Amino acid sequence: MAERHGALLVALEHRFYGKSINPNGLETENLRDLSSQQALADLAAFHHYISQRFSLSYKNTWISFGGSYAGALSAWLRGKFPHLIYGAVASSAPVQAQLDFSSYNRVVGHSLMNEAVGGSKKCVAEVKGVFAAVEAALLMGNEVEVGKDFGCCETPFKPEDKAELLQSLADIFMGTVQYNEEGVAFSIAELCDIMTNKSEQNGQKEEAYDRLVKLAAMYRAREKVPCLDVSHEKLVFELSNTTATSSYRQWFYQTCTEFGFFQTCEDTSCLFSHMLTIQSQTELCSRVFDIPQDHLPVHTDFTNQYYGGNRPQTSRVLYVNAMIISVGQCPPMVLKGRRSPDPLPRLCHAAHRPPSASVRPQLAEEGRGD
């Protein structure tokens, strides 16, 4: 597109990510400048540098774009620096900070129910029932058996390790919905087929528990994961690692200091385990970064006040969102921009970027027929 329009395409790496990390930069005391506000200031400085480097003038129009967190930055850049940025494209942009992101799992449930992508009410019922069964088995003292069944690296005796196992199993479903048919282990259709297929083994029909065990084994094989790591202490250790090459520690810091986005399951409609609480997730902020849990609501409130939440006072920002559920079902936290009466089932997070999913011709045809 840039070549077709004769545009200059430039990109800036977010400080504290990738190679933009100073020695000892991930020590907690050095993370004070890791924020979206600093990122926007860096982008403004980058605008000045590029303008000088390529002899650009005010006649050269700037359009920012990005996806996911970078999409939110794109929208906020236009909002905070309208004299620099003429317009913005914000793809799958989470512009509304929310501490308890329970709406995420409501969307997962709706998506697994959507027949247009291979879901069904039966699939949802099986998933909800089997997570209740696994949780009950863990709480009744069957940790050794459950740990072996799901290929855990260690037996989940501690309550926090049980929650990690249930989170790991839920992640299979969450990831499938969020990136349906886009480089993940399963599509929704395949996942629901496994969870609802009561095939017989040794003359007996498989129970939902057995089907979830099979699904977890297939996931480990496809993702080349030898065992499910359910140690909460190991998670704390990994998040505390200041020499890590991944972006896990950095992003978690920003969830604690700015955004929240903790995907909880305390809502009665949630399909997964109710052990996935806001308390269990936010205690990591305190343990890893010494950020008191009672400070977190203040952080997310400030972010929304500063940027405008899901009602930003900006113009010329294109919010592009892809969902598996129909637009009318989208919670405000998930669907950004204006609501639309268009009944076309939306695809997954970031699915509007790659064009390959086989389900799209069917959905497009359904959309044209309405």
Image (cartoon, grey):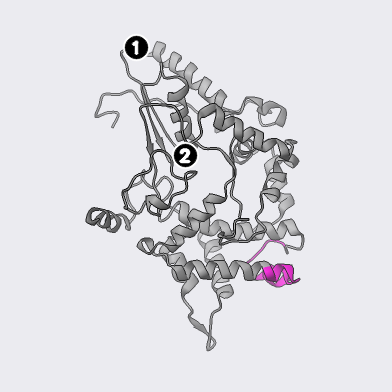
| Image quarter hosting the C terminus | bottom left
* Image position of 359 with respect to 238: above or below: below
Instruction: Tell me if 104 is positioned left or right of 115 in this view.
Output: right
Q: Residue furthest bottom?
A: 203
Label 1 Cα neighbours within 10 Å, binned few <14 / some 14-19 / many ≥20: few
- The CA distance from mark 2 to mark 1 is 29 Å
Q: Nearer the viewer, residue 121 or 359?
A: 121
Q: Quadrant of residue 111?
A: bottom left
Q: Tag 1's secondary structure?
A: loop
Q: Which residue is at 42% across, 24% downward? A: 78
What residue would you read off at disc 1?
58
At 45% from the left and 19% from the top, the residue drawn is: 81
In what quadrant of the picture does the N terminus appear? top left
Q: Residue at x 50, y 61 (%)?
A: 222
Nearer to us in this view, 308 or 203: 308
Residue 171, x across and y down, in percent: 56, 56
Q: Please indicate, yes or no, whether residue 347 appears anywhere in the rendered image.
A: no
Measured from the top left, where is residue 98 in percent x and y?
57, 41
In the orientation shown, which residue stands out farthest toward the left?
A: 369
Q: Over which residues does the magenta segment extend?
A: 136-154
Q: Which three-letter amino acid code belongs to the residue tagged 2?
A: Ser
Residue 49 drawn at (x, y percent): 45, 14
Three-letter residue code for mark 1: Tyr
Percent x, y of residue 212: 56, 69
Q: Give the number of the disc on residue 68.
A: 2
The picture quadrant where one finds residue 366 is: bottom left
Residue 364 is left or right of residue 107, and the answer is left
Image side of residue 126 versus residue 341, left or right: right
Pointer 2 or 1: first along the chain? 1
